[in-house]
Amino acid sequence: AFQLDPRSIDDFGFKIVETTIRAIQKEEIERGTTVKINESVVTAIAYKQDSSTHENTAIKGLYISEIIPQAEPYTGIYVFIKGTADVDAYAVGDKLEIVGIAEEYYDTTQISPTVTDDIKKLGTADLPAPAEIDGPSKISTPYAQNGEEWEPTTNHGADAEKYESVLVKVNDVTVTNNNLGHGAFEVTGNLAI
């Protein structure tokens, strides 16, 4: 018996495409492609929570942005962390290099690293100023109740796709549903947060 010992990911015979978040979000990169984002900054963290105490127990994903002065359409994306990471493994402002598969999951574009080493900390970086949105209904992501669960609908605002996973700021909103599940809530204009 013998064991293969790959020297690098290139030994597996597939290509990693160096690209930008914007190119992935604008579908210039085919879904299923292994991509590499050389530099990005963490703008938000999605936590796994204890169902009874609602305490953060692990990180299940990261929202990252291109490193730019102000957020723009198509410059943010979700990074799914398979198997979760320790609650303090990443922080908002971490500068990262990401390798993973570009894919759609429930109509949301994401990058799915296959191993923990596919996310490398490079230091820290400034967050972009949020994109300011006039009227949250333009980027709405309404949910509907299905039995005990709240599920996203497909009736999104006109600009929802452009601002998917982008750091945004909306003004003059109130919470209209404080429990969409998984720590999410909804504000004026059917905008899920």
Image (spheres, grey):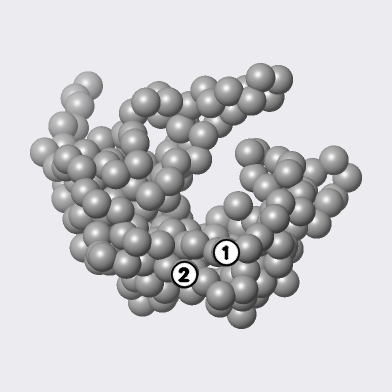
Using the rendered view, name the quadrant where residue 110 is placed: bottom left
Residue 77 appearing in the image:
yes
Name the spot of residue 64 as percent of width and height, x first: 36, 53
**How far apart are the two marked residues, 2 and 1, measured between alpha carbons?**
8 Å
Q: Position of residue 99 (x, y in %)?
A: 28, 50
Q: Is residue 32 left or right of residue 18?
A: right
Residue 13 visible in image: no
Q: Amino acid at mark 1?
A: Asn
Q: Which residue is mark 2?
A: 132
Instruction: Classify 11 as above or below 162.
Output: above
User: For mark 2, does the 10 Å Cα neighbourhood hold few (<14), some (14 to 19), or many (20 or more) residues?
Assistant: some
Residue drawn at (63%, 39%), measured in percent from left and top? Answer: 183
Return the x and y of residue 76 as percentages of the image width and height.
40, 61
Image mark for residue 63:
none
Instruction: Please tell me whether mark 2 sits on a helix, a strand or a loop.
Output: strand
| Residue that appears at 58% across and 23% down | 55
Residue 40 drawn above or below residue 131: above
Q: Are marks 2 and 1 in contact (CB under 8 Å)?
A: yes
Question: Residue pushed farthest left?
Answer: 7
Residue 88: quarter of image: top left
Measuring from the top left, give residue 188's x and y in whole percent: 71, 62
Relative to the observer, which residue lies in front, 161 or 134?
Answer: 134
Residue at numbered disc 1 = 171
Total marks shown come to: 2
Q: Label 1: state its secondary structure.
A: loop
- The outermost residue toward the front is 172
142 or 26: nearer the eye? 142
Q: Earlier in the sequence, mark 2 or mark 1?
A: 2
* Residue beneath the point at 24% across and 52% down: 126
Q: Amino acid at mark 2?
A: Glu
90 shown above or below 103: above
